[in-house]
Amino acid sequence: MTAQLINGLALAHRLRATMRERAEKLSQAGYRAGLAVVLVGDDPASAVYVRNKLRACEECGVGSQSYILPGYATEGEVLDLIDRLNADDSVHGILVQLPLPPHINVRRVIESIDVCKDVDGFHLYNVGALVLGQSVFPPCTPYGVQLLLETTGIEVAGKNAVVVGASNIVGKPMALMLLQKEATVSICHVRTRDLAQFTILADILIVAAGKPGLITGPMVKQGAVVIDVGINRLPNGNIVGDVDFESVRERAAWLTPVPGGVGPMTVTMLIENTLRSAERVAGLAVT
Ligand code: GUN
């Protein structure tokens, strides 16, 4: 079997076209959706992610403002900035790029964001709501994966879903969303013994471990759906996922490429959440 590729880039472009129309409708109603991005320090990878997010806003007609603080900024300065953004009616979404420098308490910062502007979906309230299947803003990467599965026509209910990686940003919320859709879910992590005994049972395998080549063909069930969330830069400069593409492609029925799979969907769902927030404020949304 040779897997069909799930083209996240194409879906992201289609979604962004409809998002431009939504931004236009908002502007006709007198609103401009606005995202504020906070970056503390000079982590090069974070700077690239932030640039991509700002570019996507521009592409979709969503306003954006970046607030770049030096790595020595105090927690109080970050909290003051968030207070101002919470109170600013032109800001519909606030995103604090992670990781933050170690002297800043991440939870305190995220919990200071107004829940109605938490477009990353990282606030305790949003995480708790996700457990009940009611989140205000679903976290962007798992939300993007869910949409990729839906638009590809992949049924989740009753399937064995295995999530590799238990991060707060991807693995844990992904598992909750799959559970909400009635999959039987297992979560594997760094302390899992014999990873392959779990992955081989997966009808749907989601890999978000940050380890290139972690999943190889023999670890994958014939005909499985494999979603590779990893983005790793190799010493030669190539970007690869966590899945050994060539060997897994021979076993899976569906596979996301890296780049061009999950990555473009993550940024797109951030725009989705920001638009939804603005639409709520403008009275244009039912939810
Ligand atoms: N760092 C890595 N991924 C993310 C993300 O999705 N959101 C934020 N805020 N920071 C990140």
Image (spheres, rainbow, N blue to C red):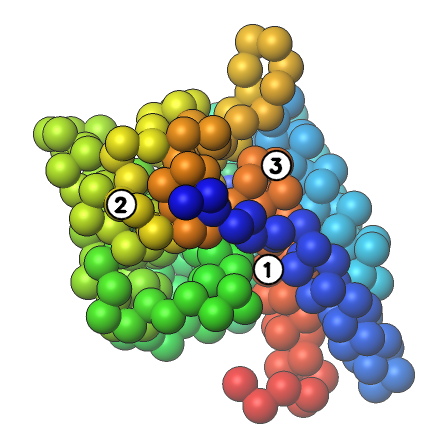
- Number of numbered labels in the structure image: 3
- From where the camera sits, is residue 3 visible? yes
Determine whether the residue tagged by mark 1 lies in a helix, strand or loop.
Answer: helix
Q: Is mark 3 within 8 Å of ligand 1?
A: no
Specify whether 268 is left or right of 146.
Answer: right
Which residue position holds label 3?
Answer: 259
Which residue position holds label 1?
Answer: 269
Q: Residue at x 61, y 19 (%)?
A: 238
Estimate the x, y position of residue 13 in percent, counting from the top left. 74, 58
Specify whether 87 is left or right of 98.
Answer: right
Q: Nearer the viewer, mark 1 or mark 2?
A: 2
- Whole-angstrom CA distance, mark 1 to mark 2, is 29 Å
Cβ atoms at labels 2 and 3 below 8 Å apart: no
Q: Quadrant of residue 133?
A: bottom left
Q: Is mark 2 within 8 Å of ligand 1?
A: no
Q: Which mark is residue 221?
A: 2
Compare marks 1 and 2 and give the one earlier in the sequence. Answer: 2
Q: Nearer the viewer, mark 1 or mark 3?
A: 3
Vertically, is 155 above or below 195?
Answer: below
Specify whether 89 is left or right of 73.
Answer: right
Cβ atoms at labels 1 and 3 below 8 Å apart: no
Q: Quadrant of residue 33?
A: bottom right
Q: Which mark is residue 87?
A: none
Q: Nearer the viewer, residue 155 or 13?
A: 155
Q: Nearer the viewer, mark 2 or mark 3?
A: 2
